[in-house]
Amino acid sequence: MPFVGDFHFFDSPQHAGPSIFPPMALKSLAGRSQRCGGWIAYILIRGVSDDEVRHQVEGRFLMAFFDWKDNMSVGNQVIDVDHRKLIQYLNEMQEAMIAGHGKDIVGTILNRLVAYTHEHFAREELIWKSGHYAGFEKHKKEHGDLLKTVTEFKAKYDKGTIALSVDVMNFLRDWLKNHILKSDKEAAAAIAATAHPGAAKPAAAARPTH
């Protein structure tokens, strides 16, 4: 049986019965886990309310959804701050989705995310363009493609013809993570190499004289 931390994971709710827990457990609560895509059963101990347990479980999943890592820094403070903010909005949307909030809350966070994405891309493109990045047009197209996808999703979400899902959240997280680690880092490195040619590769060792 897979075991992670305080949580047991199952393929279906039928496998999440009370018998799996040690005698100290009073009852089990099975619920759909939006984070892992499976079912989760966790223990309710005497004196701990259902809401408290749910809060702890949801918090654990949120922490694992999208964490900022030091290796995601592109070496530009403005861009790094923007990326952290986008990650924050994604985590807030994930939290709202797991908590079962409606469009009044999820929609508000989505609006902030879309607006901030527009602002971030504009700032980032200005930085790349001012640095004479050779791959600027390709990079800008990546931004445009995502904005088109997100704008279309938001329009459908606002009309109520589509809902926020695990697939959508995973797509946004993976796109941003891959874009930062690959496209943004490539742009930053190319600009740095152009600005400081000597840093692009180590200088050739001087040949010994005879």
Image (spheres, grey):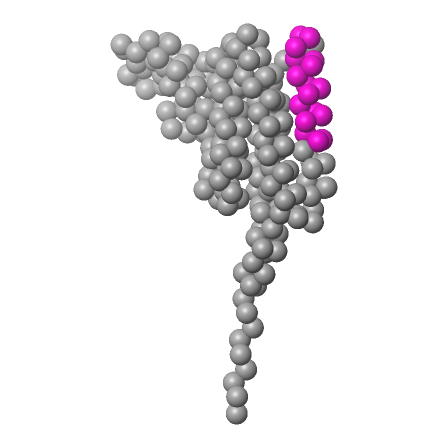
Tag count = 0
In the depicted view, which residue is nearer to us: 198 or 34?
Answer: 198
Query: On the rendered image, what quadrant is the N terminus found in?
Result: top left
160 sits left or right of 69 in the view: right
The span picked out in magenta is: 144-160
Nearer to the camera, 25 or 79? 79
Q: Name above or below for residue 188 compared with residue 21.
A: below
Query: What residue appears at the point 37 percent right and 24 percent down from the top-left corner?
Result: 6
Judged from this view, the residue extending furthest toward the bottom is 210
Residue at coordinates 30% horizontally, 11% vertically from top-left?
Answer: 48
Q: Residue at x 71, y 31 (%)?
A: 145
Where residue 125 sits in the image (x, y, percent)? 64, 38
**Magenta span has 68?**
no
Q: Quadrant of residue 54?
A: top left
Residue 4 in sight in this render: yes
Q: Is residue 179 visible?
A: no
Residue depicted at x 30% and y 16% = 23
Tell me if residue 209 comes above or below residue 86 in the rendering.
below
- Residue 5's place in the image compared with 154, above or below, is below
Going by the picture, which residue comes out furthest to the front? 130
Q: Is residue 123 left or right of residue 20?
A: right
| Most foreground residue, 25 or 96 | 96
Q: Position of residue 198 (x, y in %)?
A: 56, 63
Q: Quadrant of residue 172?
A: top right
Instruction: Name which quarter of the figure residue 160 lies in.
Output: top right
Q: Position of residue 142 (x, y in %)?
A: 69, 36
Q: Main secondary structure of the magenta part?
A: helix
Q: Position of residue 204 (x, y in %)?
A: 56, 73
